[in-house]
Image (cartoon, rainbow, N blue to C red):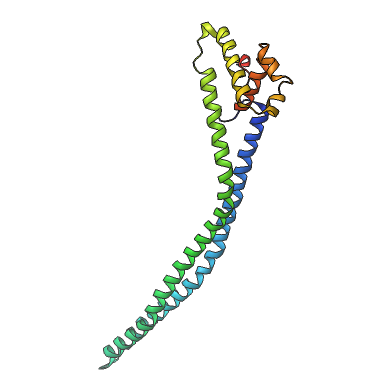
Amino acid sequence: MHIWSERPGSRAREIGADVVTLLWLTIWLTLGIRLYAFLANLAGAGRLVREGGAGITSAGETIGSALEGLPLVGEGAASGVRGALAGAGDPLITFGTDLERLLLVISALLGLLLVATAVVPWLNRYLPWRLAKWRRLNAAATAIHGSRPTSRKLILATEIETLLASRALHRLEYDELLEFTPDPFGDWLAGRHERLAEAELDRVGLRATSAR
């Protein structure tokens, strides 16, 4: 299986695109994580509220324990103080917990939104192009080189060259053909198929068959 083209120019472009994409993903993932960490610090406000409520409830328990030692009214007073301070502290605990969770969720969503805004458009262009190149390269390699009997290698190489030249002549644009031969039709009619075959191999990213 081929990951990159065999042709130096195409291979360099593909590796370059892969490296740039990896760097792009790394940069924006790092920024997204840092944004989340920065915004998550705001959740400390929720923790402060929760801890304040817990402190009020704890103070009620402490005062209640002290009042229990009083004769006659100790238990009633302790129960009243505990209930009053718990009634003031418990809502703060609940509110602080909910606020902390909300701020953490918002931080995560904003971090993901930042990453998605930068990464998704990039991948929408990169992935279809890269997958198409990869599929075409491996399909061509299998079709051209995959099942050639050794005993008929020279004969089949000539036949494959003719087929590749035909594909180039029928599929490539004129400007693409002229990059390899100044007279594509003349080469075909004269049986000079090497440069036309080279044009088709270049299109799919493979080296010349003689080089394998």
Q: Is residue 122 left or right of residue 181?
A: left
Nearer the observer, 48 or 27:
27
Kindly identify the residue that appears in the image at 55 percent across and 32 percent down: 134
Residue at point 58%, 44% (across, down): 125
Residue that protrudes farthest toward the bottom in the picture: 72
Q: Nearer the viewer, residue 140 or 170?
A: 170
Q: Is residue 186 left or right of residue 143?
A: right
Residue occupying the far top of the picture: 151
**Residue at image coords 51%, 13%:** 148
- The image position of residue 187, as x and y in percent, is 69, 15
Name the residue at the left extreme: 72
- Coordinates of residue 205 in the picture (x, y in percent): 61, 26
Compared to residue 81, the image places residue 205 above or below, namely: above
**Total number of numbered discs in the rendering:** 0
- Look at the image and tell me whether residue 2 can be seen: no
Q: Is residue 31 above or below residue 8?
A: below
Classify 181 as above or below 114: above
Could you tell me which quadrant the C terminus lies in? top right
Report the residue that reaches farthest toward the right.
Answer: 182
List x then y, in percent, for residue 128.
55, 40
Q: Residue at x 51, y 70 (%)?
A: 44
157 sits to left or right of 85: right
Q: Quadrant of residue 52?
A: bottom left
| Residue 110 showing in the rendered view | yes
